[in-house]
Every structure is written in C-alpha cells, then in structure tokens.
Amino acid sequence: MSEKTPSRPLPETRNAGEKFWKAAAEGSLLVPKCTACARTFWHPRPRCPHCGSNRVDWIKGSGGGTVHTFTVVRQSGDPFFKTRVPYAVAMVELDEGPRMMTNVVDCPVDSVKIGMRVEVVFEAAGENLAIPMFRPAGSAK
Ligand SMILES: [Zn+2]
C-alpha cells in the first residue's frame, strides 16, 4: 500500500455477520431471516430483533432495493473517505424488507433520489472482502 492511497476503514467481518461477509466476497447478498417469526432484519445479530428467537437463518437477497433516504457527504476528515467525496450515503430498503445503510455509487450524487430503484454491486476491498453498495437499477457496467 502506497502512502498516497489511504486504506479503507474495514467492517467487522466476524461474529454474527461472518456468513454475510463470506457471501459478499462471492458476490452474493445475504439477508438475516428469523425462522421463528419469518421476518427479515438488518443488521446481522444472533437474536431476532422482532421476537427474540435465536433461530436466525439467512436468505439470498435479490440484490434489488429502493432508496429510502440519503445524504451526500461533501467533506470528510477521514484520510480514505476524503478521497471519495462527494459520495452518497443512503438507507436502502431491500426488496426483502430491511433497510441497510450503504452507498449509492456509479452515478452522479446529484442524480440520487428518494424512491429510486437500485441494485447491489460489490466493491472489492482487499483479499476476500467485498463491500455491498448500490447503483441505479439497470446500470450497464
Ligand atoms: Zn423472529
């Protein structure tokens, strides 16, 4: 890693989210789902936030979602994120139900709108790590 390229702050990939991050590295978006009450949720955790059951499993998400709300970050004190401004931070409501804090990428930040359809795209962040982000649905790449 060169001095010119600050490293990305990395997510916690162990514990409840381990399976999620493994799947993400393979290009698949998993969503936690409780097998006791059949509801989905985000973020990964050992117990269902709806009913308290520990019967938490995973389903494969469609990768589709809708921007619930967002903001545009135009300044950052973090050495890595400073290189990324301006960028859109969004709450994306997954088609499976839960809302995920993420980024909307591959489009000008001024084109991001509440209600826009988005699809997951994985940004490689080192060996065996990919970070799910979203881009406008139907983007060709
Ligand atoms: Zn439950």
Image (cartoon, rainbow, N blue to C red):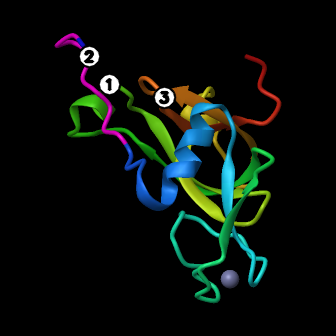
- Magenta-colored span: 2-10
For mark 1, give the secondary structure: loop
Residue at figure coordinates x 37%, y 38% from the top left: 74
Circle 1 residues within 10 Å: few <14, some 14–19, many ≥20 = few
Disc 1/disc 2 C-alpha distance (Å): 9 Å
Q: How crowded is mark 3: few (under 14 residues within 10 Å), some or many (20 or more)?
A: few
> Is residue 104 visible in this depiction of the protein?
no
Q: Is residue 70 located in the magenta-colored stretch of the structure?
A: no
Asked if residue 138 is positioned above or below residue 31 in the image, the reply reads above
Sequence-earlier tag: 1 or 2? 2
Residue under pointer 3: 128
Looking at this rendering, what residue extends furthest in the front direction? Answer: 55
Furthest toward the left, the residue is 3
Does the residue at mark 3 contact the one at mark 2 (Cβ under 8 Å)?
no
Mark 1 — residue? 83
Can residue 50 be spotted in the picture? yes
Q: Is residue 31 above or below residue 126?
A: below
Rendered-image quadrant of the C terminus: top right
- Which residue has dot 2 on it? 5
Identify which residue is drawn at 37% across, 50% down: 12
**Within the image, what quadrant is residue 5 found in?**
top left
Residue 117 in picture, x, y percent from top left: 78, 46
C-beta proximity under 8 Å, tags 1 and 2: yes
